[in-house]
Amino acid sequence: MSAEQIPEAEVAVKHEQEVAAEAAVIRGYATTLTPELYLKLWPLLRKPIPRWFIKSVGVVKGKPYASTGVSSAQVQVERMDNVLTPLWWRDTATYEKEGTLARVVVEVGNLGELPLVCRGSYGGVDRGSTAGNVYKGSYTNAAKVAFARVGPGHEIYLDAVDLDPDVHEQAAAEQVRSHPAQAGTPRLLTPEECAKVVKATQDAGLDDDELMLLLGSVGVDSTDDLTTAHAFEIRGILDRRQGS
Amino acid sequence: MSKPTTERVEREGSEFTHYPEIGLSIEYRDASHRYWLHHEGERRSAVSVTSALKVLDKPALVAWAERMGVEGALRLERAGQLVGVPPEDAVRVVRMQSMGADAKRDAGADRGSAVHEALRSYCALGTVPKVGDFPTGVRGYVQGLCRWLLDAQPEPILVEQIVGSPRYGFAGRFDLLANLDSQRTLVDLKTSGRVYAEHHLQMAAYRTALVECGDHAERSLVVSVSEDGGFTPVDGVAEAEDYLAVFDCHRAMGRVRRAINAREKAEEVVP
């Protein structure tokens, strides 16, 4: 990583942290993913992936066209975890033709129940240095599009088709122009969200003075100044208190 | 054991803390940062707990001061403020511009005072610190303090109390004696970024003096708050004899220095 890439990497990571914080506020202490809750979280799944996670590849051997896509499906996996927690989604892969063809299905919903959302895609490779690389390559190509169809990275793979995930260079370039620094400032909580935070502190047994200490410990003096990042931090503190 | 009765009286620039039950009064002058013990009809000078610790070598402090000085000089050089200044004079410009170790140390002292005032105010008056009332550079430390107060929920017994040892002849002021997890705990707050061995010795000294003043602590705890809003509680590990060994060393150095001075004075008057 070059020196000038570091700030952009930080911006990208902060952006994902901010998405995670905002999702945590929306989820609260919910343990079941209802359709209503999913619809509140869905826009976060669809928030554009920061450009630092996107790569463009020119014409290479075995791929006779320039393409743009996420550098790794891992960023999409992270977004799914950050927004839905690892409990409310899963992916399964099936392989054909000695692993050169994969079908990845991503399901969103509660474990053991019918999924609320289900999207899938085929992906393939025609070569690999080892059998493992063949399976890995076909899985990755399928997963990138499958995840994009659920939300993360949808803007990059707008008209992607099975087997050929890295296609929408124009759309990706547009998102790069539109969202140069997604990290920005964390959003201030709405009055309703502030009330939820206060309620959570009361449920945790905090009195007024302790609430003020809690606010001070995240760097604010009033609930009016709370952002999604603060709410995320507060939830962590309350969880640790309850854990101990 | 009965709770010690203390009384603070400001007189002629001195602050007095009285322990009537053991016939001890401790006088403190802020201007000179000196202590005197009034005990058994005598007023005698006492060594400050922290002053005695200055006898210890602190190599990290030298390295830190060097780093601060170099940083300050480089910043001034890049701002064009060292043009034409001979290298051997650069340190004077660095000091004048408050860019060196002295200025950093003073800033650290101000920061420490502000955070200690927040602790005192909370423990003595129940006033929750407001982060926004503090300068930007201090807010992270105050956040750390709030976080520790919330986490530890101390029940204050004595706050910023002066204690002294008539037996050994030292005195000092600790930050807090509080019940923590049902244990009578002596607490010292630090903004130095980490807890050094000297801090453990300091706590051992306060515990020793506290016993002589008719009270006690079951444990000691150094709480280090940091710029990023975190805190680290560290249990004190030093015993009374550890501090007393350093204290003896301090006194030995004092005796030697006085002897040298006396001899030099005597030699001056010899024709």
Image (cartoon, coloured by chain):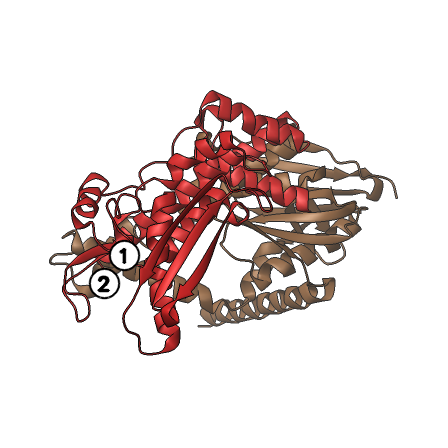
Say whether marks 1 and 2 touch (CB < 8 Å).
yes
- Residue farthest toward the top in the current orientation of the protein: A191
Quadrant housing the N terminus of chain A: bottom left
What number is the disc on residue A2? Answer: 2
Instruction: Give the Cα distance between marks 1 and 2.
Output: 7 Å
Crowding at label 1, few (<14), some or many (≥20) Cα neighbours within 10 Å?
A: few
Could you say which is closer to the camera, residue B18 or residue B64?
Answer: B64
Question: Does residue B128 appear in this view?
Answer: no
Q: Give left or right: position of B59 versus A129.
A: right
- Tell which residue pokes out farthest to the bottom in this image: A130
Residue situated in front as seen by the camera: A86 or A200: A86
- The picture's colour for chain A is red
The correct choice, above or below, for A54 with respect to A26 in the image is below
- Which subunit holds the residue at mark 1? A
Q: Position of residue A42 (x, y in %)?
A: 41, 36
Q: Position of residue A123 (x, y in %)?
A: 32, 59
Residue A194: percent from left, percent from top: 51, 25
Which circle marks residue A6 in the picture? 1
The answer to whether dots 1 and 2 both sit on one chain is yes
